[in-house]
Amino acid sequence: MPRARLALIVAAIALVLLWRPLIRPAAQATLVVADIFAPLLPVPLASWVTPKPRVSDTVERFAGVEMRVTWWRPGLGDRHEAVMVVNGASPYGNDNAATRSLGASLARAGFLVMLPEFPFLKEGRLDPAAPEIADAAFAHLRALPETRGSAVGAFGASVGGGVLLSAAGSRPAIGAASYAVVLGAYYDLDTYVASVVSESQPRDGVVVPWVPSQEARERVPPAVVDAAPPRHRDAVRDALRKGTYEEVLARLRALPGEVTERHAALSPSAAWERIRTPVFWIHDPNDEFEPLAEAYAAERAPRSGRFSLVVPRLVQHAEPGSVKGGGPLDTLAELWRVLTFTIEVLRVAG
């Protein structure tokens, strides 16, 4: 057999063997990262080589709650891997620009994207039923004919990431997801709230200053009060008065059982050991909405499932950004970190 023909056969076999575990996830990850961070690149790579996604809206009912759902489908094909996106607590809901950009980027890489407009997130409420509602939505996505037999994962941003992980540890559908990716999420509701109220966070065994955003200071404490049964709301307000991190956390954990049970229902920490799906966590090192301490707490917590954390400087909370004060090489290095992380997600999912 001529050497050229033998080399061609070997190359073809290698391509077949490496397509699923390496080449395909690398190609998908490159398209996702290139489209999300297109403003940082010299050319709009993803939009040049992929067809425009198909976008539509439907009205669905999950766990008895009616909501708008936005769908992004790849421009070609009728069977796809899929991702359910759980938005943060944005008053813009499914019209949030960063979330819509993410949906389009994932669709360009070949994913069917489902974005339910969960009312509790759009309204900024802490709803103990949130994990059940999110799980029902995910079950709907997994049951679609166009996703059967394919990997189906979930992506959650900010407070939505906390809801997603809480559901993954307590509900059957998301608990069997191919993967869960969270961006700027919280691990424990009490420690998160204590950081917002005290304007500090635990780091390396000590409590250090942390400056939460004005939005977090204005929205998080009232949401915690409103989530409590009416007869306990005065006690919750008292627990949320100014104090050190340790004082606020102690007061929260001393609240009546009805209140702490509701907090546990929305805390990934309460169900952490039961989460079996691989968890991939992305966190802005300077996040002003959820402190970085939440990501490190999740990383330290014992769990049998896979966990991977990346802390890139190319995100500002739950949106793509740039390396502040850095040059082109810094940007390339951070893009590479995000790319290799995304390849790992898709390789494990596949």
Image: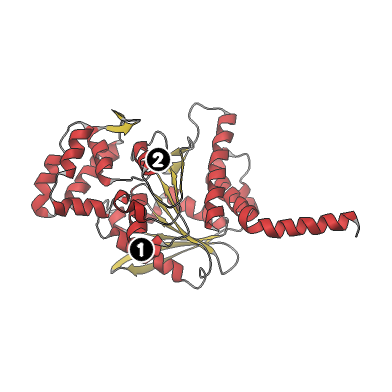
Asked whether 50 or 276 is in front, the reply is 276
Residue 87 makes an appearance in the image:
yes
Q: Which mark is residue 135?
A: 1
Residue 106 lies, with reference to residue 312, above or below; the image says below
Give the Cα separation between the discs numbered 1 and 2. Answer: 25 Å
Q: In which quadrant of the rendered view does residue 265 lie? A: bottom left
Quarter holding the C terminus is: bottom right
Q: Amino acid at mark 1?
A: Asp
**Residue 207 x/y as whole percent:** 28, 29
Q: Which residue is mark 2?
A: 317
At a point 30% along the width and 68% down the height, the residue shown is 63
For residue 64, side relative to residue 350 (left or right): left
How many dots with numbers? 2
Give left or right: position of 2 versus 38: right
The residue under the point 90% across, 60% down is 1
Q: Secondary structure at mark 2?
A: loop
Q: Position of residue 26 (x, y in %)?
A: 61, 50
* Residue extending furthest toward the right: 2
The mark found on residue 197 in the picture is: none
For the residues bearing labels 1 and 2, Cβ distance under 8 angstroms:
no
Label 1: element kind: helix
